Image: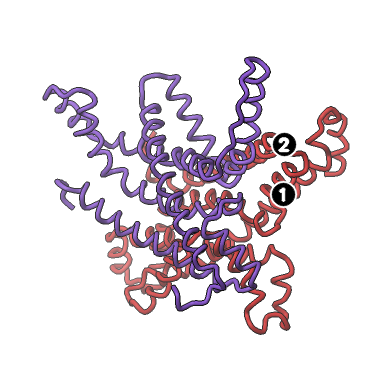
Chain colours: A red, B purple
Amino acid sequence: MEQWLAHVAPWLSANDIFTPATLARYWTGLVNTVDLVFVSLIIGLMMAVPLAIVRSSRRWWLSGPVWVYTYIFRGTPLLIQLYLAYYGFAFVPGVQDSWLWFFIEDPVYPALFAFTLNTAAYTTEIFHGAIRATPRGELEAARAYGMSSARAYRRIVLPSAFRRALPAYGNEVIFMLHASAIASAVTIMDLTGAAYFVYARFYTPFPAFICVALIYMGLTFAILAVFRTLERRLLRHRQPAA
Amino acid sequence: MLWIDFHGYGPRLLSGAWLTFELAILSLALALVLGLIAASARLSRSRGAAGVATTYTTLIRGVPDLVLMMLLFYGGQIGVNMVTDQLYALFDIDIFININPFIAGVTTLGVIYGAYMAETFRGAFMAVDEGQMEAARAYGMSPWRTFKRIRFPLMMRHALPGLGNNWQVLLKSTALVSIIGLTDMVRVADKATKATHEPFLFMLPVAVGYLAMTTVSELAMLWLKRRYDTGFEH
């Protein structure tokens, strides 16, 4: 990174705003944004699979609580959830004296907490929809083969549901990338935070925000490309023969 | 909510909630109009109009709404000042336009969600059966009457689920205006939290306020869906 900056420095010498220092800040912002989004998406995904199975249960006392969880997290703004995690944790009795204190010292942890619970709620509903849309014939075939319901889930229902959920999950990933911009509201130096810093420092809204908008757009198109490739591979059986 | 002690922030929370509601409704109206125009432009035979509309929807949907909001909010005034400065230098016209933050918020949210609405409308317009349109023409209906009586009602049936989704996202996005300085209910709660150190007392009622709004919208969507499903079997 340092070497690269030294390399582009002369090229930038005529530029007042995009100095090596500001570029380094944008770089930190990019790393923080990708970090935050990636970690919360991974943990959220791992939570969403069992939650979606429970949510699809026919027993109301199992599916009910998960429904309440997703309803609340999908019905309120992520910003409120972030503020609750960021401001709220310090006021939970006992936290101040326990090992959990690390959680409050760095705003990244409350942000990760809120983002993870939020994306888990949306992903749970996406998977739940996909599980419910399983063709009856697949289930009947599994039962006819004498599969237990656990085995049928593992071998038939889940693989077929994941494929059906793929396009919607791609949208959720992009949504999460865009939603992560609010991390700057709790003093995290993400991409948007870096842009705001540059804006406030030089009072130049157009270069500062347009630059970061282009970076976000690049990330969005990269995610779109990944999911398009995945869809082409995993949903090949659904495409018309060439 | 008189039985909870809001330390005197109660009235401000209520007026913040009203501002959230106004902001959401007005931006929705703007987004629907922009969405219809952009969708029609994308489907029109004019290549220029289609190109402009495609650029609009692609650019807006690739960037976080907060970044666009900051760009239009902080950049808007400077942009307007540059224009008025030029007017003064060239034509000796001396005006000063001060951008009202509320109008800026409505415009930004409307422009952003107009792009999402456009995609929903475009898909829905394409799903309308061509035969219906031919029948309307055979009855001698003018293009505008065809749009009003046939194309629009039929399109709405396909568009409703998407529109409902966009509205829910838009409603929750209004919370972002608190970051750029509008006193909606989130900003009031944020200020009150910082002053009193009681986050749950202020954030939880705001969360309940949003939940109430999303629940009411869901019920309204069910009613609309039944209305536009008239004449179709399930």
| Mark 2 closeness class: few <14, some 14–19, many ≥20 residues within 10 Å | some
Asked if B25 appears above or below B122 in the picture, the reply is below
Quarter of the figure with the N terminus of chain B:
bottom left
Identity of the residue drawn at 24% across and 33% down: B151
In the displayed structure, does residue B149 sit left or right of residue B174?
A: left
Which of labels 2 and 1 is toward the front? 2
| SS at badge 1 | helix
The residue tagged 1 is A29
Q: Please report, as a chain letter, where disc 2 is located.
A: A
Say if B233 sits above or below B136 in the image: below
Give the percent coordinates (x, y) of residue A32.
Answer: 70, 54
Q: Is residue A151 visible?
A: no
What is the three-letter code of the residue carrying label 1?
Answer: Gly
Residue B31 in picture, x, y percent from top left: 42, 40
For mark 2, what is the residue?
A204
Q: Are marks 2 and 1 on the same chain?
A: yes
Q: Residue at x 73, y 80 (%)?
A: A99
Earlier residue among tags 2 and 1? 1
**Relative depth, front residue between B71 and A237:** B71
Q: Is residue B9 visible?
A: yes
Q: Nearer the viewer, residue B3 or B131?
A: B3
